[in-house]
Image (tube, rainbow, N blue to C red):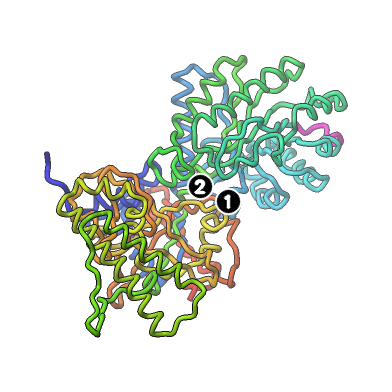
């Protein structure tokens, strides 16, 4: 057996989720322990970018990431369709609501030329933004919102300019409006019967917000005779971030049955199937089948899509409507740590003074658990009582003394007998204390403005330091933002290290919490981080914030609007870096 590894850049890569099937292509750690972006043939240290422009908070937009996911989707389909002999067309579209900022739409437009990438729009605002590309080419435009004469007027502009326009209908109102626009093709959006689980599951099922139920559709077919002629697409969308492949399969099955049945009752012009979004992005790439970690890849997804429709004849055109998957990786939020505070009461060696004896920490796990329980009991006993300053200090000191001493003792036990770790972490009370935070790092950002989904839907975003990645972490820290809102805190961290590391490297340098255990999937109560030295600028990066976070950004406490470092690659493979100031270098 080889000797277990000490801390290294390789351990950091696994700990901070940087061995990644998508962003791993361009985001890595260099030999100095700095997070770097590989831009064409060059490497740029992110800390150098922050220092160069003097930013404490910034969004780094790496536009080539968008191109590379588009290409991956396109080429994967191409390869798989050759393998399966699928002759239907592939038609990707970008659902604009995922990120409608002009920079992103422009990237989709430019990079999408080669793949004929279309758009899915759900609002008049999005149509107006797209209007600037009206005469620059023609793409597929699927309109998926509530229709009105104003919407249709805009859509007619696209149609006249040569775009392929399809308007999804999902109610009688839509059909009434569309009756007047005979030259517009329609898509029939049907509610998925199947609920795929996950945070957006309520978008599906018979009570879902979008689409027609079959009984309404069958009624409308009788009343609106033109529907047979004009319907060319069926659309079924099961929600976003569907993290298990079996749920995707169920949605595809529904789409296939709808397609076959509608064609058999006379909808002969339907030749396009739009199975909606749902292609999950691996926020944590461990294939666990959890909300942050889908159990499938784009290859599995497209393979399934083609297999499900391979028996349908003629082979329909297949619309890919994933947006999260395409843009999530392109934006990195970088922010400086501006303060380090104790998480709870501060640990100082307990001075009993007048000859009192403190109980030592026992060697047995049972004894340790008894003391842990005792520190909890004290807190509940004094609940509601008013304590003097001296009493309160004493209680705080006692509680922290025992908790910290217990952590040191557990570390000692594990070091002297590494196999005991299994037993210890299987005990919920002991696991919790060994993975509890000891610090609160205040970071120069607002979760509400910069990663709102961490507040709105408790979404997991990977956090990593951008420096010192060749060093073992010092502490587990909860991240507090600048808002005066207790929801502005981030504490969850998934630790999933495969490398056989030495016992010594399992424990943080300062607080003796564990940052990882080899081949164990752990959820920690804080982020493993280094204590910034005096006058040291210590920055954190929040990865994969390119989908939904821009349009959902909130202005809580009026903290919003970070500067942006926009990176692209020119024709000869060289980086092109533009800075958009938005007025401030720091939120402070
Ligand atoms: C939101 C939405 C999408 C995007 O889905 P993601 O899985 O988040 O990429 C696709 N299609 C429709 C109709 C949507 O409303």
Please determine whether, in this image, residue 144 is positioned above or below residue 311. Answer: below
Magenta residues span: 179-185
Report if residue 180 lies within the magenta region.
yes
Q: Where is residue 263? Give x, y as percent.
A: 71, 18
Q: Residue at x 34, y 74 (%)?
A: 346
Q: Are marks 2 and 1 in contact (CB under 8 Å)?
A: yes
Instruction: Return the residue at label 1.
Output: 99
User: Within the image, what quadrant is residue 353 found in?
Assistant: bottom left
Q: Nearer the viewer, residue 510 or 260?
A: 510
Relative to 318, is 216 on the left or the right?
right
Q: Specify the principal SS of the magenta part.
A: loop
Q: Residues within 10 Å of mark 1 (few under 14, many from 20)?
A: many
Q: Whole-Å distance between the Cαs marked 2 and 1?
A: 8 Å
Instruction: Return the residue at label 2.
Output: 327
Please determine whether, in this image, residue 364 is positioned above or below residue 486. Answer: above
Q: Where is residue 383? Give x, y as percent.
A: 49, 71
Q: Nearer the viewer, residue 26 or 351?
A: 351
Q: Which mark is residue 537?
A: none
Please determine whether, in this image, residue 35 is positioned above or below residue 143. Answer: below
Q: Where is residue 422? Give x, y as percent.
A: 26, 45
Q: Where is residue 520? Give x, y as percent.
A: 30, 44
Quadrant of the displayed image that contains ligand 1: top right
**Is residue 578 at least partly visible in the picture?**
no
Relative to 110, is 144 on the left or the right?
right
Q: Residue at x 28, y 65 (%)?
A: 511
* SS at circle 1: loop
Q: Residues within 10 Å of mark 2 (few under 14, many from 20)?
A: many
Q: Residue at x 59, y 43 (%)?
A: 200
**Is residue 588 at least partly visible in the picture?**
yes
């Amino acid at each position: 057996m080889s000797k277990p590894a000490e801390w290294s850049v390789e351990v950091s890569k696994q700990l901070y989720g940087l061995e990644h099937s998508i962003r791993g292509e361009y985001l890595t750690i260099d030999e100095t322990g700095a997070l770097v972006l590989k831009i064409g043939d060059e490497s740029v240290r992110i800390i150098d970018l922050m220092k160069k422009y003097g930013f404490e908070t910034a969004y780094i937009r790496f536009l080539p990431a968008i191109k590379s996911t588009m290409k991956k989707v396109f080429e994967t389909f191409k390869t798989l369709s050759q393998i399966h002999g699928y002759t239907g067309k592939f038609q990707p579209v970008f659902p604009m609501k995922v990120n409608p900022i002009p920079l992103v739409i422009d990237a989709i437009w430019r990079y999408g030329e080669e793949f004929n990438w279309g758009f899915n729009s759900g609002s008049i605002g999005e149509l107006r933004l797209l209007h600037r590309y009206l005469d620059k080419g023609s793409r597929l435009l699927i309109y998926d919102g509530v229709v009105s004469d104003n919407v249709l007027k805009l859509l007619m502009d696209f149609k006249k300019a040569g775009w392929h326009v399809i308007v999804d209908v999902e109610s009688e109102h839509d059909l009434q409006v569309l009756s007047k626009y005979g030259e517009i093709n329609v898509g029939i959006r049907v509610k998925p019967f199947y609920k795929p689980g996950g945070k957006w599951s309520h978008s599906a099922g018979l009570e879902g917000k979008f689409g027609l139920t079959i009984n309404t559709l069958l009624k409308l077919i009788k009343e609106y005779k033109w529907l047979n002629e004009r319907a060319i697409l069926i659309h079924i969308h099961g929600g976003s971030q569907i993290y298990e492949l079996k749920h995707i399969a169920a949605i595809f099955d529904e789409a296939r049955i709808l397609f076959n049945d509608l064609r058999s009752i006379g909808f002969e012009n339907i030749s396009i199937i739009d199975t909606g979004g749902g292609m999950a992005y691996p926020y944590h790439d461990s294939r666990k089948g959890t909300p942050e970690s889908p159990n499938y890849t784009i290859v599995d997804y497209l393979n399934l899509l083609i297999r499900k429709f391979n028996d349908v004849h003629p082979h329909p055109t297949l619309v890919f409507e994933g947006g999260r998957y395409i843009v999530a990786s392109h934006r990195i939020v970088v922010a400086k740590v501006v303060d380090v505070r104790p998480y709870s009461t501060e640990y100082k060696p307990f001075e009993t003074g007048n000859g009192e004896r403190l109980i030592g920490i026992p060697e047995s796990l049972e004894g340790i658990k008894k003391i842990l329980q005792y520190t909890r009991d004290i807190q509940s006993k004094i609940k509601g009582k008013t304590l003097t300053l001296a009493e309160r200090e004493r209680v705080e000191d006692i509680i922290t003394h025992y908790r910290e001493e217990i952590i040191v003792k557990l570390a000692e036990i594990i070091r002297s007998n590494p196999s005991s770790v299994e037993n210890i972490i299987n005990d919920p009370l002991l696991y919790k204390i060994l993975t509890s935070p000891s610090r609160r790092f205040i970071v120069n950002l607002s979760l509400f403005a910069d990663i709102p989904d961490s507040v709105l839907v408790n979404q997991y975003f990977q956090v990593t330091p951008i420096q010192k990645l060749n060093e073992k972490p010092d502490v587990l820290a909860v991240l507090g933002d600048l808002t005066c809102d207790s929801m502005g805190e981030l504490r969850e961290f998934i630790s999933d290290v495969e490398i056989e590391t030495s016992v010594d490297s399992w424990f943080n340098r300062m607080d003796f919490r564990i940052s990882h255990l080899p081949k164990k999937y752990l959820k920690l109560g804080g982020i493993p981080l280094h204590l910034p030295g005096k006058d040291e600028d210590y920055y954190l990066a929040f990865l994969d914030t390119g989908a939904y976070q821009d349009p959902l950004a909130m202005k809580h406490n009026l903290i919003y609007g970070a500067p942006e470092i926009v990176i692209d690659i020119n024709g000869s493979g060289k980086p092109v870096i533009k800075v958009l100031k938005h007025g401030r270098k720091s939120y402070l």
